[in-house]
Amino acid sequence: MATRAKNIFFCAECGYESPKWLGQCPGCRAWNSFAEEPVQKKAPAGGFVSAGKRAVPQRLSEVTQTAQERIGSGIGEFDRVLGGGIVPGSLVLVGGDPGIGKSTLLLQMSSILSEAGHVVLYISGEESPQQIKLRADRLDKPSGKLLLLAETNLDAVEAVIEQQKPEIVIIDSIQTMFREDIQASPGSVSQVRETTGSLLRVAKGQGITIFIVGHVTKEGVVAGPRVLEHMVDTVLYFEGENAASYRILRAVKNRFGSTNEIGVFEMCQNGLAEILNPSEYLLEGRPENEPGSVVAAMMEGSRTMLVEVQALVCQTNFNMPRRTAAGMDYNRVNLLLAVLEKRLGIQLAFCDAYINVAGGMRISEPALDLAVVFAILSSYKNKAVPEHTIVFGEVGLTGEVRAVSMAAGRVAEAAKLGYAQCILPYANLEGMKKNRKEFGGISLVGVKNVRDLFGLLER
Ligand code: TYD
Ligand code: MG
């Protein structure tokens, strides 16, 4: 195919192409993210390896299913997010802010796997082998068998893969890799896309699992991981608050498993440690018997997490009362305050309200509503909520408490951690009466509306 060189503008956030510069990207609405790059239009990158002219279609019934043998990564939380282990021949993108721990996680995994006898090749375009060794020395069980390569030229990388025949390859990071035949500089949209395209062909053609590290970028200097999200099989994001030491690994896309799962880690002196029971971790140091503190049972994928919600309601010194929400939606807090004011007739318009989900978690599940409402009422009345109690439920605009999904799982988690009482939507209570025995001695209190909840505080 004839190649023609010309310049195109790309959005560095999402890869949107445009013949001219644009202030705002029509694709992802990012501002000032366009950069000019030379491109050579060739066969599109990505896609499955083609068999050329002799391609023949198959009947679905004739396709033989080869059982997907997954490789355990040696890190349980990581396997959970991947959907039960590493799928051979898959392309996995691990995205996240710089410094969050992507290299640490992948080095830890590579170390464990190479010690278990797998051939793992770790390619770093950012650090020298000495630096990687330094980092590996901090880890619990460094492995001497891991193959290291400091290289940014993808053609050289492909030659090494050809020669060493590894089972697993780590590319740290995609923004440092380049192909010589692409004129744009490393980190540009065309380089990131083309190098990923080449890696995709290596992964699918040779059955090698490739993990690609992608930095989330500020202000479009280099292309972010979103540019290549559609090309890879699995997209994982590693996130966490800077101040908190725990990190959450979340699947955003997964062709081999659920996208609801999360893995929880803590960054320690010797690498990332798995947190097997996040509820205990998040509730550590919770004040007992203090007004305004409530424990809520939330779902993250298939696992229940108990988190503490705090509210501080006090008389305002401003014309406009102040409201803040950390860890949940600000507008939702305003809505819940309005519901309480209207349905219970309490004068929150003259009160400041500060809501905080402790531990730095961010929660978007509506089942948090009832706990927020309870925390607000508790702080407003200056009365602690009943001891050893957990709360969950969605609150509607008329003050009604609506049923939420997976109520039994939430109650079971609370029972496991020794809670004595659970306040839940009345509608959920009906459905749970049958299998009550499963929850041990925990007492279940169903509420139909916010008035019922207020009544519980009066007792
Ligand atoms: P890193 O894996 O380099 O982040 P990324 O590859 O996502 O940019 O993580 C770097 C941070 O982690 C750094 O601030 C140091 C910290 N760290 C620890 O606290 N303990 C450790 O054992 C290691 C290896 C790193
Ligand atoms: Mg790194």
Image: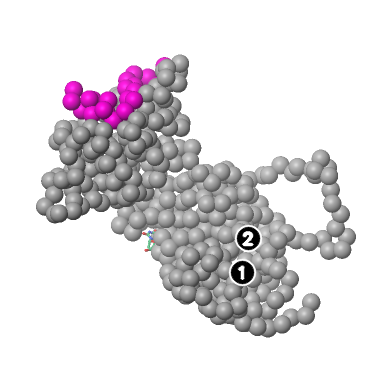
Q: Is residue 245 visible?
A: yes
Left or right? Give the position of 274 relative to 39. left
Mark 2: which secondary structure?
loop
Residue at x-position 33% and y-position 33%? 398
Mark 2, ligand 1, within 8 Å: the answer is: no
**Residue 454 on the magenta span:** yes
Mark 1, ligand 2, within 8 Å: the answer is: no
For label 2, count other residues whose C-alpha is less than 10 Å away and answer few (under 14), some (14-19) or many (20+). some
Residue at x-position 14% and y-position 54%? 318
Residue at x-position 72% and y-position 74%? 42
Q: Quadrant of the N terminus?
A: bottom right
Which three-letter amino acid code belongs to the residue tagged 1? Arg
The location of residue 422, given as percent across then percent down, is: 32, 26
> Marks 2 and 1, how far apart in space?
9 Å
Left or right? Give the position of 112 relative to 333. right
Q: Quadrant of the C terminus?
A: top left
Left or right? Give the position of 386 relative to 97. left
The location of residue 189, given as percent across then percent down, is: 57, 72
For label 1, count other residues whose C-alpha is less than 10 Å away and answer few (under 14), some (14-19) or many (20+). many
Q: Which mark is residue 307?
A: none
Q: Splitting the image into four quadrants, where does ligand 1 fall?
A: bottom left
Mark 1: which secondary structure?
helix
From the image, tell me which residue sits under label 2: 231
Q: Is residue 390 above or below residue 333?
A: above
The location of residue 240, given as percent across then percent down, is: 38, 55
**Residue 457 on the magenta span:** yes
From the image, tell me which residue sits under label 1: 193
Instruction: Give the extent of the magenta segment.
Output: 437-459
The location of residue 173, given as percent across then percent down, is: 53, 67
Mark 2 near mark 1, Cβ–Cβ under 8 Å?
yes
Closer to the camera, 159 or 312?
Answer: 312
Which three-letter amino acid code belongs to the residue tagged 2? Met
